[in-house]
Image (cartoon, rainbow, N blue to C red):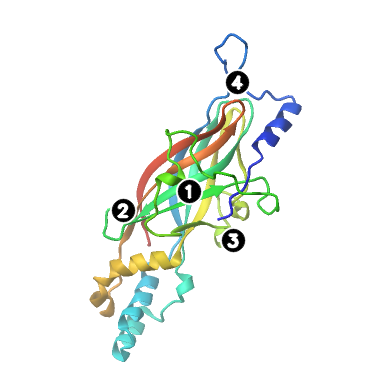
């Protein structure tokens, strides 16, 4: 993961030279100093946007469980068709946030910490965590890694050190659109800086991918107990329970680096 150094201070400087007030509210010390208001953030959805079908998994694992047995291979071919290519069994998901801002200036979302527990509550449960840093131009060469990416400024929100993934590299940030299009925007700029408008709110999304080897390993464990049904041509069906939580990081004038915790948001993904 390539983290980036955001341009929060530069953005605020441009706003101030344009005549926009940088802060709102009263500092309360009688000096007329004002303090910004922390933005609001709510994780609204974690949608599985790329997934293999039950039929694809049935075909893949039936041939896998056949282990070269000619009769079993013929049975798999008859029931499910040819085994799909491993790389076609992609798992990808999108997090959607509702962000709000009561200040008189826009606020950039600088970093995002996501911890995702898949197959939560089952014997296959696995936790993964990822830190994402955004910048104005993800393609530029001067987007350097922050000194302490996704580190919480205090103990009120979870930092990256609070999540110990049980599977390395379970999650990664995806670059590129989902099947060439997405109703929430152009994901070619998935790592681009997102701004919450002044005195307004916005819906923003970040797309991720689940590591193929990790997910197929977990699914294999789940289906191993049903291998005999697969070899009889019965299509497996199951949901993937999950729990998502983490923190969003902002830089505010006067207040400096701040973070907002979100989640946990619990749900289940279906492969229908």
Residue 193 horizontal/vertical position (percent) = 62, 44
Residue with the mark numbered 3: 180
Question: Which residue is situated farthest in the bottom direction here?
Answer: 70
Residue 233 is labelled as none
The residues tagged by marks 1 and 3 sit, at their Cα atoms, a distance apart of 18 Å
Seen at 34% across and 75% down, the residue is: 61
Frontmost of labels 2 and 3 is 2
Q: Earlier in the sequence, mark 2 or mark 1?
A: 1
Residue with the mark numbered 4: 24
Res 219 quadrant in image: bottom left
Question: Which residue is situated farthest in the top direction here?
Answer: 30
Seen at 23% across and 77% down, the residue is: 228
Residue with the mark numbered 2: 120
On-image quarter of the C terminus: bottom left
Q: Is residue 18 visible?
A: no
Residue 270 horizontal/vertical position (percent) = 36, 58
Frontmost of labels 3 and 4 is 4
Q: Is residue 228 left or right of residue 96?
A: left
Looking at the image, is 174 positioned above or below residue 107?
A: below
Q: Is residue 128 visible?
A: yes
On-image quarter of the N terminus: bottom right
The residues tagged by marks 3 and 4 sit, at their Cα atoms, a distance apart of 41 Å
Residue with the mark numbered 1: 95
Seen at 24% across and 75% down, the residue is: 229
The residues tagged by marks 2 and 1 sit, at their Cα atoms, a distance apart of 18 Å
Q: Secondary structure at mark 3?
A: helix
């Amino acid at each position: 993961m390539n983290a980036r150094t955001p341009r929060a201070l530069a953005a605020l400087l441009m706003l101030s030279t344009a005549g926009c007030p940088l802060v709102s509210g009263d500092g309360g010390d009688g000096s007329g100093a004002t303090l910004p208001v922390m933005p609001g953030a709510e994780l609204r959805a974690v949608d599985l946007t790329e997934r293999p079908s039950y039929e694809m998994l049935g075909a893949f694992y039936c041939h896998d469980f056949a282990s070269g047995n000619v009769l079993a291979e013929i049975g798999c071919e008859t029931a499910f068709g040819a085994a799909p290519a491993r790389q076609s069994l992609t798992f990808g998901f999108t997090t959607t946030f509702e962000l709000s801002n009561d200040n008189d200036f826009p606020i950039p979302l600088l970093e995002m910490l996501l911890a995702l527990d898949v197959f939560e509550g089952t014997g296959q449960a696995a936790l993964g965590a990822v830190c994402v840093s955004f910048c104005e131009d993800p393609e530029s060469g001067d987007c350097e890694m922050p000194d302490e990416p996704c580190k919480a400024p205090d103990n009120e929100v979870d930092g990256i050190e609070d999540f110990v993934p049980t599977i390395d590299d379970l999650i990664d940030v995806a670059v590129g659109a989902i099947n060439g299009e997405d109703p929430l925007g152009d994901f070619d700029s998935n790592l681009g800086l997102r701004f919450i408008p002044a005195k307004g709110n916005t819906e923003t999304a970040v797309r991720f991918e689940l590591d193929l080897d990790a997910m197929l390993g977990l699914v294999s464990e789940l289906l191993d107990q049903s291998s005999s049904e697969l070899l009889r041509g019965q299509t497996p069906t199951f949901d993937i329970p999950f729990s998502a939580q983490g923190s969003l990081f902002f830089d505010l004038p006067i207040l400096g680096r701040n973070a907002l915790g979100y989640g946990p948001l619990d749900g289940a993904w279906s492969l229908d």
